[in-house]
Amino acid sequence: MKIKEIITEIERVAPLSLQEEYDNAGVQVGNINQQASGALICLDITEEVVDEAINSGFNLIISHHPLIFKPLKSITGRNYIERSLIKACKNDIVIYSAHTNMDNAYEGVNYRMAELFGLQDVRILSPMTNKLIKLVTFVPEENAENVRKVLFKAGAGEIGAYSSCSFNAYGEGTYLATEGCNPYRGKIGQLHVEKEVRIETIFPNHIKSHLIRALLSVHPYEEPAFDLYKLENEWQQAGSGIIGQLPDWEGELIFLQRIKDVLNVESLQHSNLTGNKIRSVAICGGNGAFLINDAIRAEADIFITGEAKYNNFYEVENKILLAVTGHYKSEICTKDIFFNVISKKFPTFAVQISTANINPIKYL
């Protein structure tokens, strides 16, 4: 099995098109066409992590945070980033990162945290926009059902919890085949009128090439007609943060203690207690303070994130309870996501979670 096959599975869950513009997710270094000997999973990459991969005989490291985040003008070994890259290159190790694309994926970091807290009726807190495309194609009536089935199987027609969604209108299409054509119906040089179905469906932009290939493979026409429209609609299956409901109401202090226990937090920061019980919980791993107002508008009782500024604790006032776990603790569950994705698809492949303690923040 080649390394690129493992990367493909990760990107099925977290396509690179979901990453933010400032990010640098994806392959950091190495040849993904080489055979995979094993994968080491981590949150951040340090020299200690690279050594662990070498000692385990693994040639793939998968991290959440990219090792290369800012442009490099030279690689001389002057810091841990450059030393880690040099060591990885010397040992033919591929480094791959899934960062904000895994944050924004529906089954990504925040979804996993929602699972840990037992949240129900989970939905994206701030859905992404400009990530959907509408496909419109025109098919002979007797072929419409088969074309729809192929498009749906390829990933089109998903709206929220609904699948196989399409709109269909019946009409007539015309064409005139010239010399050298091989028309589905009609004769060369004669105008042909065909009863057709106009099929409309939507799909996420990262599967565009795959979907067009699927359409062309099943469409009966020699030259299929189809249109693609970029949509500004919110995509409810991807975006920042997540919100869900606890099965029952919980007291504020009880739930704050549960956060510490579930995430193994040494020191939990929180704003003034509101005096209300907790039922609706909003979450954003990492630096998620930019979603505080979204959580308030969604009427969440508490917002859990990894980082927040001093003034954020003032600004929430009595509108919402703010709980800050620390960046590392809020995203450590990412390692479980990578492990589960790989193990499910490749059950006999050697994959392990790094045991290196690379949290740069220590507590006295």
Image (cartoon, rainbow, N blue to C red):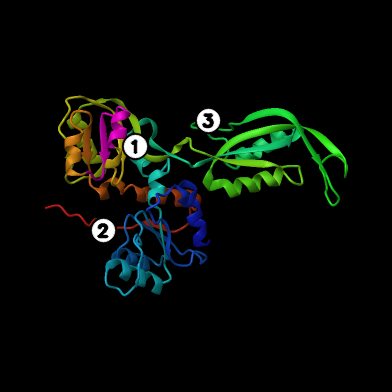
Distance from the alpha carbon under mark 1 to that under mark 2: 24 Å
Residues packed near mark 3 inside 10 Å, few (<14), some (14 to 19) or many (20 plus): few
Characterize the local packing of mark 2: few (<14), some (14-19) or many (20 or more) Cα atoms within 10 angstroms.
some
- 310 over 2 or under it: above or below: above
What residue type is disc 3 on? Tyr
Q: Position of residue 203 (x, y in %)?
A: 55, 40
Mark 1: which amino acid? Ala
Relative depth, front residue between 187 and 25: 187
Place residue 353 in its image quadrant. Answer: bottom left
Q: Secondary structure at mark 3?
A: loop
Which residue carries the number 3 mark? Answer: 162
Magenta region includes residue 295: yes
Question: Which disc number belongs to residue 114?
Answer: 1
Marks 3 and 1, how far apart at CA: 22 Å
Image spot of residue 298 (x, y percent): 33, 29
Q: Nearer the viewer, mark 2 or mark 3?
A: 3
Q: Which mark is residue 225?
A: none
Judge left or right: residue 230 versus residue 129. Answer: right
> Which segment is the magenta one?
292-308
Local secondary structure at mark 2: loop
Which residue matches tag 2?
Answer: 358
Q: Earlier in the sequence, mark 2 or mark 3?
A: 3
Badge nearest the viewer, 3 or 1: 3
